[in-house]
Image (spheres, rainbow, N blue to C red):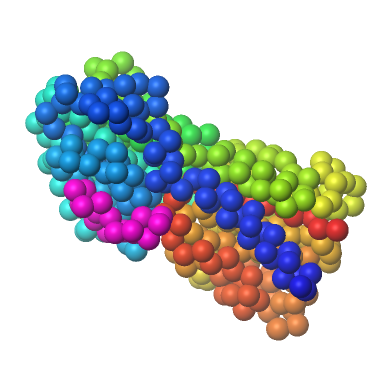
């Protein structure tokens, strides 16, 4: 077997182990089980005899397999349900059809669309008027913010789409984007819990946010919102986009600043007294599984951190430096070595190319490790779609830039144009997984071979 082929296969094996560890259906089943009328959810138990109705709602890329797992457990006890998922994500991880008692609605991501708005409106109507003998299971996963777009009165879906595009292009972090989204929504920032109160609410959450802050994942529909109108407004000012944001949104935020509209529910609000939030899957779980598999494959392996953030090309240079250190000095790991990290970088778009943050990270890394043999830096989006592309990421090798030059490709020019997708496509180094039906942020791998 050619050495290069074997190395590709080793990288693929480590990636598969990471993704398998956060398969949404398995993650739900680890936290949810039923014994007759007793429902066990994490460290709590619920008597189904105390509830007349059970509803299942939610939003996120992993919604279909999560819903299938919930239906396996609760079956006929589910009264009704609706979950918004990204277009093309209706099948469970095992390729099964979506749950029959829970309506799966395909909607737009990362820019919300009308299908998502209608689905979110249906969910809000389902939760309105519930009582203490109702139980609501909320399935939340990556993409939930975009997939549950229910704007406040006076704000159109087109306005939300324009806002999302502007925030994505300016390089705002997910925390900053969600702070704004919460204050123009009827669902985000604890407002789903407010709609369902006084029903019992249990949220099963597949985290796609660095550090797993519950108020940030999918904009925290079932948890207190610590952000304020003032913080949301500050995001627009920080990036100088006040004049680019639709007037309806500017007016809403200004009204909030003036105290003319109510804030999102805060810690201590009684709507949260009947809410349980459970993390069922996270970046840490995926990253540790990758480390374990790398060791099985004969690598010395280390999980560096799951809190990696920053501009993708800057982060790339840091990991390229780590790769060189391992190759030359055997620190922090002696080759053959695999260093794993997790988190979520950002990209400030300056060009007109195609790509995602993981592909951009790989391209910047390729430039930084040019000429270093036996070294690879990999960026992987665990949802299988890195930015608006069909690739999950890309692999940068020490000879990537040299191979590209032989094909007449200027790596630096492609990076300047944010066109990592076409660069790696030409070299055959894109990572194509298809939709993984999970989403727990991104993973970065540094491999040093012997």
Percent across and percent down for residue 109 are: 35, 57
Farthest front residue in view: 36
The structure residue drawn at horizontal position 40% and vertical position 27%, both measured from the top left corner, is 42
Majority SS type along the magenta span: loop
Q: Is residue 263 left or right of residue 322?
A: left
Whether residue 215 appears in this view of the structure is no
The structure residue drawn at horizontal position 77% and vertical position 51%, both measured from the top left corner, is 298
Q: Quadrant of residue 185?
A: top left
Magenta-drawn stretch contains 95: yes
Q: In the figure, 77 relative to 371: above or below?
A: above
Magenta-drawn stretch contains 384: no
Q: Quadrant of residue 412?
A: bottom right
Q: In the figure, 358 relative to 193: above or below?
A: below
Task: Pick the residue in front: 184 or 110.
Answer: 110
Whether residue 93 appears in this view of the structure is yes
The structure residue drawn at horizontal position 53% and vertical position 67%, both measured from the top left corner, is 432
The structure residue drawn at horizontal position 63% and vertical position 57%, both measured from the top left corner, is 13
Q: Quadrant of residue 227?
A: top left
Q: Which image quarter holds the N terminus? A: bottom right
Percent across and percent down for residue 39 are: 29, 27
Farthest right residue in view: 329
Percent across and percent down for residue 287 are: 60, 43
Number of numbered tags placed on the structure image: 0
The magenta segment? 90-106
Q: In the figure, 54 relative to 374: above or below?
A: above
Q: Is residue 47 left or right of residue 4?
A: left
Q: Which image quarter holds the C terminus? A: bottom right
Farthest bottom residue in view: 407
Task: Pick the residue in front: 1 or 177.
Answer: 1
Q: Is residue 24 left or right of residue 73?
A: right
Percent across and percent down for residue 367 are: 74, 64
């Amino acid at each position: 077997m050619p050495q290069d082929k074997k190395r590709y296969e080793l990288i693929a094996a480590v990636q598969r182990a990471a993704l398998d560890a956060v398969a949404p259906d398995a993650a739900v089943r680890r936290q949810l089980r039923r014994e007759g009328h007793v429902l066990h959810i994490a460290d709590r138990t619920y008597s189904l005899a105390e509830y007349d109705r059970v509803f299942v709602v939610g939003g996120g890329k992993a919604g279909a397999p999560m819903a299938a797992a919930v239906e396996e457990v609760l079956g006929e006890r589910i009264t009704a349900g609706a979950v918004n998922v990204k277009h093309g994500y209706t099948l469970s991880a095992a390729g099964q059809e979506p749950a029959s008692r829970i309506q799966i609605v395909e909607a737009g991501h990362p820019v919300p669309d009308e299908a998502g708005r209608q689905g979110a409106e249906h969910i809000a109507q389902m939760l309105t008027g519930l009582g203490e003998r109702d139980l609501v299971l909320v399935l939340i996963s990556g993409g939930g913010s975009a997939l549950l777009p229910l704007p406040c009165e006076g704000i159109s879906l087109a306005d939300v789409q324009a806002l999302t595009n502007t925030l994505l292009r300016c390089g705002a972090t997910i925390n900053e984007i969600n702070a704004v989204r919460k204050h123009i929504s009827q669902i985000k920032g604890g407002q789903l819990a407010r709609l369902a109160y006084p029903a019992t609410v249990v949220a099963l959450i597949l985290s796609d946010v660095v550090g797993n802050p519950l108020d940030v994942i999918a904009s925290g529909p079932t948890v207190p919102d610590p952000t304020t109108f003032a913080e949301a407004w500050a995001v627009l000012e920080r990036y100088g986009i006040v004049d680019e944001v639709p007037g309806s949104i500017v007016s809403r935020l200004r009204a909030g600043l003036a105290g003319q509209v109510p804030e999102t529910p805060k810690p201590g609000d009684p709507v949260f007294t009947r809410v349980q939030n459970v993390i069922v899957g996270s970046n840490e779980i995926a990253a540790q599984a990758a480390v374990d598999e790398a060791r099985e494959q004969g690598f010395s392996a280390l999980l560096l951190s799951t809190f990696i953030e920053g501009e993708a090309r800057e982060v790339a240079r840091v990991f390229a430096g780590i790769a060189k250190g391992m190759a030359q000095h055997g620190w922090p790991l002696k080759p053959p070595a695999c260093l794993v990290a997790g988190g979520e970088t950002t990209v400030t778009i300056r060009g007109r190319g195609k790509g995602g943050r993981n592909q951009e990270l790989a391209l910047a890394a390729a430039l930084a490790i040019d000429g270093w043999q036996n070294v690879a830096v990999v960026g992987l989006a665990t949802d299988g779609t890195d930015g608006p592309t069909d690739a999950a990421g890309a692999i940068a090798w020490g000879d990537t830039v040299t191979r590209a030059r032989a094909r007449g490709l200027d790596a630096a020019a492609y990076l300047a144009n944010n066109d990592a997708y076409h660069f790696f496509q030409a070299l055959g180094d894109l990572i194509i997984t298809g939709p993984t039906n999970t989403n727990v942020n991104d993973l970065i791998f540094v491999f040093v071979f012997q």
